[in-house]
Amino acid sequence: MMFACCRRNTFLITHKRLRLGFRCASSASSTAEPADTIFALSSGQGRCGVAVVRVTGPAAGGALRRVAGLSCGLPAPRTALLRSIVHPQSKEVLDRGLVLWFPGPHSFTGEDIAEFHIHGGPAVISGVLQALGSLPGLRPAEAGEFTRRAFHAGKLDLTEVEGLGDLIHAETQAQRRQALRQMAGDLGHLYNGWSEQLKRCLAHVEAFIDFSEGDLIEDGVLNQVDIAVPQLQMEIEKHLCDERRGERLRSGVQVVIAGSTNAGKSSLFNILCQRPAAIVSPIAGTTRDIVETSLDIGGFPVLLSDTAGLRDTGDCVEREGVRRARQMVGLADLTLVLVDSMQLPQEPQMVSGFLSEYLKNVLPSAKDHEQGYVLILNKSDLLPKEHISMIQNVLTQTSDMAPVSILSCHSREGLDDFLTLLQDRLKTLCGDPLAGSPSLTQTRHRAHLQKCVDALNQYYEYRDTDLALAAEGLRLGLSSLGRITGKVGAEDILDVIFRDFCIGK
């Protein structure tokens, strides 16, 4: 009897310590169900053929009955019903459309949901929203409130919520693929898997601390943790070393066109934009400020910048443009280094040396690597084809020179080869969103994962001197992972302790 009492007291100490350790992460179970019912236009703004108005909350069924004139009860779940949409007070017919009923918990928010599929004219939408607003207990939804309720109901974790937002804002095919994969839970499954591993490690350490003296824990428990923690840390560090591919794909690749004056930078910019976005002039120094535009190149999002020609100048305005150009090159993910072919040496054997010096003048030394730039020789239409062939042969034999694109912005010759090279480089920078493990997409994820790695180092530091502090390192690491998905709690650790070791059965 005394042994059972001591064991229960030890359990309470463990429970208290775990409770104190987890204050940081949200939990779906700790959030009370909202008492009010909200409504909003769920489709896009503006005139359209069909608009969708959604209602969620405990009064959604009553709102559907009153606005759709359903005196005989609610329609069958997930079945479209054609009805007249009427104002509940004036009984005026506002529209004729489809209504649908999604009873909770089998709905997007986990609550009862009613949907009105109406014509997308502004007057119709406004009339239906006003009708819903006239019902007691209903109010307009705040921004993102439907998705927030889905999160609190456990329908989505935070990574899936972010994937949904990215899908809504996706502008290219690659962004859509990455967002769909994240919304499907691939990233959340990866992080939850790591959380489960770390949760088990922490539970084993906690159990060893509290129950080892009573011979309730088998030998070798800490040895298992010693093997699992470095393996987990290695996986997280590998995930972090992705060169920001997912983040770059989500926000867009920063591509900067740079080079000397009159090299044809603005001409190339206009070709890629497919419109006269920048002024083209034979006068050197025409472009003095940064000209930017967003593009979809091969399915990858690109923020393209045209810059001032790089040269020494006494003009204070142009000098500021050159400073900004160099600053943009320093921030770029990819620099298109443009060279005027007419400035190349007459002797082909000297071209590689000339280009090496040219690159040093354009690129910061830290970015002077093959994946950081594309070298473009413009105005090839002004050179004899035999001379171009000799230049290509020389550059092919130069091992330290990245692939060079030779083209003419005037005649468009060589443009297809350049676009192929550019798309290949963009794919390298962004990766294939459907291949391999899902990529990091948010700076927030990176920060929490790095904190997790740092916390795991605490386990190694105190493993042999203070096991309680070593366990605290695991707890901090688990907390950091939980902040990414929004799921972590003390009860999860206790479940593992008593399941794995059958304590107190």
Image (cartoon, rainbow, N blue to C red):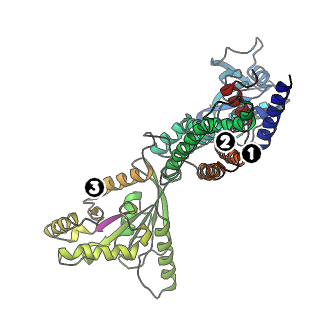
Residue 83 occupies which quadrant of the picture?
top right
Q: Regarding mark 2 in the picture, which secondary structure is present there? A: helix
Query: Residue 193 location, x and y as percent?
Result: 58, 35
Asked if residue 415 is positioned above or below residue 52 in the image, the reply reads: below
- Left or right, 170 with reference to 348: right
Query: Residue 351 location, x and y as percent?
Result: 23, 74
- Left or right, 31 with reference to 289: right
User: How busy is the neighbourhood of tag 2: few (under 14 within 10 Å), some, or many (20 plus)?
Assistant: many
Identify the residue shown where x is 28% and y is 63%.
Answer: 404
Residue furthest to the top in view is: 72
Residue 393 occupies which quadrant of the picture?
bottom left
Q: Is residue 109 at least partly visible in the picture?
A: no
Between the C-alphas of marks 2 and 3, the distance is 47 Å
Residue furthest to the left in view is: 386
Dominant SS of magenta comes to: strand
Residue position for label 3? 417
Between circles 2 and 3, the one closer to the viewer is 2
User: How busy is the neighbourhood of tag 1: few (under 14 within 10 Å), some, or many (20 plus)?
Assistant: some
- Left or right, 226 with reference to 62: left
User: How busy is the neighbourhood of tag 3: few (under 14 within 10 Å), some, or many (20 plus)?
Assistant: few
Choose between 286 and 390: the one closer to the eye: 390
Q: Regarding mark 3 in the picture, which secondary structure is present there? A: helix
User: On residue 24, which mark appears?
Assistant: 1
Choose between 48 and 245: the one closer to the eye: 245
Residue position for label 2? 482
Contact between marks 2 and 1 (CB within 8 A): the answer is: yes
- Amino acid type at image mark 2: Gly
Residue 378 occupies which quadrant of the picture?
bottom left
State the extent of the magenta-drawn residues as a range. 373-377
